[in-house]
Structure formats: C-alpha cells, structure tokens
Image (cartoon, rainbow, N blue to C red):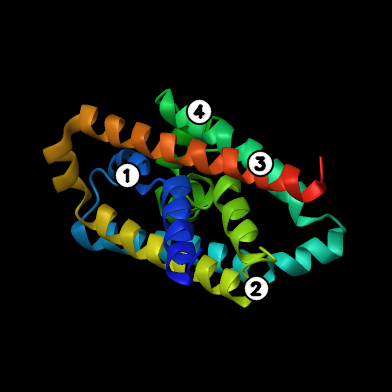
Amino acid sequence: MSDFTYFLIAAVAIFAVVDPIGTLPFFAAFTIGYAPADRRVVLHRTVLFFTSILVAFALVGKFLFAAFGFTLSAFEIAGGILLFIVAYDMLRGEIGPTKLTATDRDEAIQRRDEISVFPLAIPLLAGPGAISTVMIYAGSPSAGPLGVLAAVTGAVFTGAATFLIFRFGQRILDVLGRVGVMALTRVLGLLLAAVAVQFVITGILGVGF
C-alpha cells in the first residue's frame, strides 16, 4: 500500500466515523435563533475542540498502549466492534448510545453556552469511535511514523471538512432535505462498517488465531 493510499484511507475512515453530515441537523437544531456571530463562535469552538482531541489521541495513543499494557491487536478488535455498532446505528438512521441520548439533547438546548463542547464536540464528533480510529491508524506498526502523520492529517482534514459542512449547513440541508441527509449518513455507515470489519480481521490476524 502506497503512502498516499494509506493517508487517503485514514482520512476517509476518520471522516466516516466522525460523520459531520449526520451531525449537521443537530448543529442546526442547537443553534436555532442564534445570531450569525454567535453561531460562528459555536462553530469555531466546536471544530477546534474536537479536532484537538483527535490530534492529541493520535499523538499519545501509543503511550496509552504502553501505560495500560494492551496490544494494538486487542485495541483493533475492540475498536472494530465499537465502530461496527456505530455503523449499524448509522445504517438504521439512529445515533445510538455512543453518540447522543434524548436526555442529552434536552439538556443541551437548556445550556446553549456549552454546546460547542458538549454535545457537539464530545460525543457527537469526537466520540469513542473516532478516538479509537485515530489511535489505531496512528499506532499501526506497519505504517511507523507515517501512521501518526496519517492520523493527524486525517483529523485535520475532517476538522476542515466539518467546518465547511457546518458553515454552509443550512444551505446543504435546504438542498438535500431530510431524506438526502439520511441517505448520505447510510452511505457513510456502510463505509464505516467495512472499515470496522477490516479492523477486526487485522486484529485477529495479529493475535495469530
């Protein structure tokens, strides 16, 4: 696999699990009634915060492996299972427990000053699935230092793409409509399911079953 291909796969996988298109309706709902300047503040803080979280885990993920004593293969299997659950929920058109609950949505509406951190940045964007993905790509022994760079690049790319999607989100929603957003979310869910299965296969092969 070429370096470019590895970078591309990492970027697509991170973008798919973060799923900014599927999260767009929540961003639009949470910022209803905001002045344009206030909406931009929420947007900037959300993107900066969730991107920083993913980059941080990409950089220190291997140290966490060493500190807790688990192998990359174990993390790949666990992360793959987690990603598949998220992908399954996306394919069914549901957010799922690793994303956002109904109670979380009600509380977020009441605490609008905090929504850029919770629930938008965490757990809607930088959820367990996204964190697992960047750690797996960054810690891949076959990729070496390029793995960390690919994970960081993928996180930054996803942050930039999320900014653009949220920035022009209302226009996108008007063009796509609810059905269009649901269709795209399901496509991303299918891609994510394939990535999740590959993670599990790679982890099992690494264990030596």
Image mark for residue 88: 4
Q: Residue furthest top?
A: 92
Q: CA distance from mark 2 to mark 1?
A: 31 Å
Q: Nearer the viewer, residue 209 or 79?
A: 209
- Sequence-first disc among 3 and 2: 2
Q: CA distance from mark 2 to mark 4?
A: 31 Å
- Quick check: 3 left or right of 200? left
Q: Residue furthest right?
A: 69
Q: Which residue is mark 1?
A: 21
| Image spot of residue 71 (x, y percent) | 81, 55
Front: mark 2 or 1:
2
Q: Which residue is mark 3?
A: 201
Query: Marks 3 and 4: CB-CB under 8 Å?
Result: no
Crowd tier of the residue under label 2, counting other residues whose Cα lies within 10 Å: few below 14, some 14–19, many 20 or above: few
Amino acid under label 3?
Answer: Ile
Amino acid under label 4?
Answer: Tyr
Q: Is residue 173 above or below residue 49?
A: above
Amino acid under label 1?
Answer: Ile
Q: Which residue is mark 2?
A: 144
| Image spot of residue 131 (x, y percent) | 59, 54
Q: CA distance from mark 3 to mark 2?
A: 20 Å
Task: Name the residue: 49% across, 59% down.
Answer: 10
Task: Name the residue: 45% across, 34% down.
Answer: 105
Task: Name the residue: 19% across, 40% down.
Answer: 173
